[in-house]
Image (cartoon, rainbow, N blue to C red):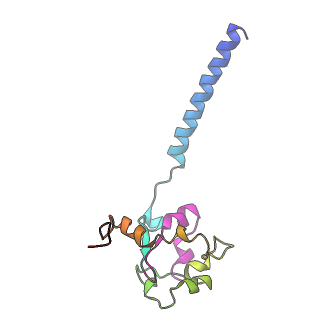
Amino acid sequence: MNINQKGFAGFFSVLALAGLLLALVWGQAVGAEEYDEDTYGPEAPIVFVAPVKAVIFTHKTHTMDAGLTCDSCHDEIFQMESGSTEQNDDFTMKSLYDGKYCGSCHDGETAFASNTRCTVCHIGVKGFDRMQGGPKTDAHGGH
């Protein structure tokens, strides 16, 4: 490779790198949609504490990421009022396995089955305590 070819190759290498950087910056500026709670639901996760403590739900995963709308779940599968679902006697894992509540979609076909990948939703007591700012007991279980 002579000196002119090296200069030419170097120029195109710099040009390609600049193009890649521009594409990354442009992609983030254009592709990064701002979260809108009116469109996508509350940004903060919902944490169910009944029938077991604790199950986490994020609207973003279901709306922005999966493309669902509020009407996909509200008001037929879930009431819009916070905490109302937990008051239902049939809000149990059995009812989910039977296709109610989360099981309406988490059936193994529409989305992963509600009897698989448990830790995606179930964060447990320790996870709940961490979300609330740390454990409520000391290292030995005392208060």
Q: Is residue 9 positioned above or below 91 on the image?
A: above
Q: 130 or 8: which is nearer to us?
A: 130
Q: Position of residue 126 (x, y in %)?
A: 41, 69
Q: Position of residue 123 (x, y in %)?
A: 47, 69
- Outermost residue toward the left? 143
Q: 104 or 118: which is nearer to us?
A: 118
Q: Is residue 81 left or right of residue 63?
A: left
Q: Which residue: 58% across, 37% down? A: 23
Q: Which residue: 50% across, 53% down? A: 33
- Outermost residue toward the top? 3
Q: Is residue 16 positioned above or below 40 on the image?
A: above
- Is residue 66 found inside the magenta-colored segment of the image? yes
Q: Position of residue 139 (x, y in %)?
A: 32, 66
- Magenta stretch bounds: 50-77
Q: Which residue: 46% across, 54% down? A: 34
Q: 28 or 128: which is nearer to us?
A: 128
- Outermost residue toward the front? 140
Q: Position of residue 31 (x, y in %)?
A: 54, 49
